[in-house]
Image (tube, rainbow, N blue to C red):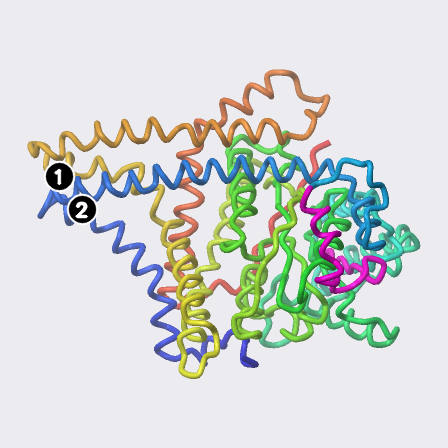
Amino acid sequence: MTDIEIPYAKDRNWQYRFWEIFPGAVSWTILITPFVLSFVAPQLMAILVIAYLLIWFFKGIALSIRVLQGWNSMQTQMKLDWPLLLADLQATALTEPGRKLPKWHTRNIGRIGEYPLYCQPDEVKHALIVTLYNEPRDVLEPTIKSILASEFDMKKVILIIAFEERTGPDIEKLAHDMVKEYGSAFYHAEAVKHTVLEGEVRGKGGNITWSGRWLKEYVTKHKLDPSRIVVTTLDTDNRPHKHYLSALTYTYCSTEDTRHVSYQPIPMFLNNIWDAPSPMRVIAAGNSMWNLMLSNRPHALRNFSSHAQGLHALIDTDFWSVRTIVEDGHQFWRTYFRYDGRHEVYPIFLPIYQDAVLAASLRRTLKVQFLQIRRWAYGASDVAYVATRGFRKGSKVPKIDMIAKFWRLLEGHISWATAALLISFASLIPILLKPRDFAANQLPHIASTIQTIALIGIFVSLFVTLKSLPPKPERYKRHRTVFMVVQWVLLPITTIVYQTLAGLNSQTHLMLGKYLDNFDVTEKVVKK
């Protein structure tokens, strides 16, 4: 499929608008239904609530197991000798047979004769596009230093600092200063200025696409092979694990056809978690646990935040969409339809460390956090995009695969906007409206029992979060660690106020045709 761009608002027909309205309409209907059923059929309402809680109870257990599996996989791969694994891959043999190595690596080396590598590790170069808006040097410079601290040959890395023309001369000077100071350590470094063009959303998609097109010209000029260049997008505060580039190289070389695969590391919002206010710490930890869980569900994995893709595939999709504020998740669907359903996301079980939300004041921080999650929740806009392309006449996308992926997309966004409210309050509605009904009186007790048992999921997240925390800064006393535990009592509040309301806000905007066409940049403040 060659027509993979999101249509402009003026070009969206009734079918597209139907699917834009659909997620919000379903979410609001689900939230209204308990009030209606409590009046007309309280017993049926009680049965449905218990069934819903039981479904989420078992889903919660499964999610907790996946979190533990993801954390274990990440910890294991962080400890591996990736330079040695790459050396084995290059030699197509075990260079140190006596060393203890993971079984999957030994199997990979053993079958290279039957299944040759896509390319040799020494043929691969990496392009890192670091987006810069108005962040200070204190945010950008540690990211560049963390890249340089990688156990990888930086002479195989092209660094691009992608900044916006509209941010003014100070940011332009910062970008060029960073290239001047650190550029010599890389294969090449460039500060690329993005000018917003007509028809573009003011956001990250246009910025990284502009830099991607610059990279395409650079590669052509220097006669480099785009299929041997892997592009990773990074926000200004994204700091890759020291083995990320090695693990990505290993996985890329081992991929059968890199054109049809993108690669997803694990975003962990832990850089400044000791500095962030407690509500933001809970949200950051929860989002990190969610990403750990997804890393062990590759069938449900999508591009999010920092992600990687071969340059040849990016050229085929004309890079990222410049018409949406959720260019990361949308890139999966963009590539999926470009290749008629032949696209997968492979997990890279290593972290990209990011900042928890922290602005100049608590009030501003609370607002910025909501705007960030609302931007993520605006991924519900992909429902219309996927439905109108996947189900259209003549689509070559495999129908069963398409239906499964579409259902996960739709169900995920509807649950995002409704699950927390239903789990917390649905059992109380019947007794408020029908206080003398037996089923209505019993329902809160049954629901409370299920919810109490389900708290085990919070303890799993608490355990993994505490194990994942960076060292406590010396400026904080021991009681800060106690707050890291106590803060989890805020989880129900943060989930409803931020996750649920942000989801409903995004879906309601889509319903009303009031599109979010401005990328709300998350402010980044460094506490010293």
For the C terminus, the quadrant is: top right
Picture coordinates of residue 305, whole percent (x, y): 61, 53
Residue 371 horizontal side relative to residue 210, left or right: left
Magenta residues span 103-130
Callout 2 environment at 10 Å: few (<14), some (14 to 19), or many (20+)? some
Residue 85 seen in render: yes
Q: Residue at x 15, y 49 (%)?
A: 36
Q: Locate residue 87, reporting x and y percent.
A: 84, 49
The reply to whether the C-beta atoms of the residues labelled 1 and 2 are less than 8 Å apart is: yes
Q: Which percent across, then down, holds residue 397?
A: 48, 74
Q: Position of residue 443 (x, y in %)?
A: 18, 33
* Viewer-closest of 53 and 523: 53
Q: Residue at x 44, y 83 (%)?
A: 394
Disc 2 target residue: 35
Residue 27 position (above or below residue 217): above
Q: Residue visible at 29% across and 39% down?
A: 53
Q: Is residue 375 visible?
A: no
Q: Residue at x 73, y 35 (%)?
A: 79
Where is mark 1, residue-wise? Answer: 433
Q: Is residue 351 above or below residue 6?
A: above
Q: Which SS class for mark 1?
A: helix
Indicate whether 199 appears above or below 510. below
Give the left or right position of residue 451, taking residue 227 as reference: left
Q: Amino acid at mark 2?
A: Phe
